[in-house]
Image: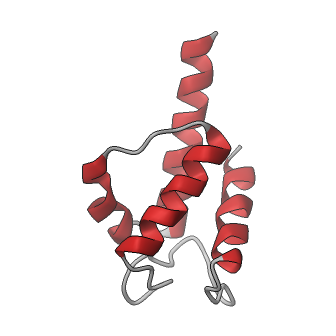
Amino acid sequence: MRAEVRAFVVEQLVDMNYDVEGLDDATTLGPSGVDLESLALSDLAVRVEDQFGLTFADDESEKLALMTVGEFTTMVADRVAEAKRDAA
C-alpha cells in the first residue's frame, strides 16, 4: 500500500507542476524540499483524501509542511490500513 500511496503522491506533484527530479523519502514537502505552499499542501491533501477516502483535520496542514515524502506516504498508508481494519 505504501508504494501505491507514494506513486500517487509523486504523480500528483507532477500534475501540480512541481519538480520531482531527485525526490526521495527524505525530501520535505514544505520549504527546502518540494516547497509546497499552504494552498498547494491543501490541494495535495484533498487529492489524497479523494483517492484514498481519508480526511485530514484542519490543524494538520502545518504538520504536513514539516513532513518528508516518506513520513507523509507512511502516514497515509497507515490510515488507509486502519480504515480497512475498522470497516472489516
Q: Which colour scheme is used?
A: secondary structure
Residue 52 point in image, percent of width and height:
64, 41
Asked if residue 7 lies left or right of residue 81, the reply is: right
Asked if residue 3 lies left or right of residue 59, the reply is: right
Which quadrant does the C terminus fall into? top right
Residue pictured at 58% horizontal, 52% vertical: 48
| Most foreground residue, 15 or 24 | 15
Residue pictured at 61% horizontal, 85% vertical: 18
Residue 42 point in image, percent of width and height:
43, 63
| Most foreground residue, 80 or 25 | 80
Place residue 12 in its image quadrant: bottom right
Place residue 63 in its image quadrant: bottom left
Residue pictured at 33% horizontal, 70% vertical: 66
Residue pictured at 71% horizontal, 43% vertical: 1
Q: Residue furthest toward the top?
A: 88
Asked if residue 23 lies left or right of residue 36, the reply is: right
Q: How many marks?
A: 0
Residue 87 point in image, percent of width and height:
60, 13
Judge whether 69 appears above or below 52 on screen: below
Judge whether 28 appears above or below 63 on screen: below
Asked if residue 9 lies left or right of residue 35, the reply is: right
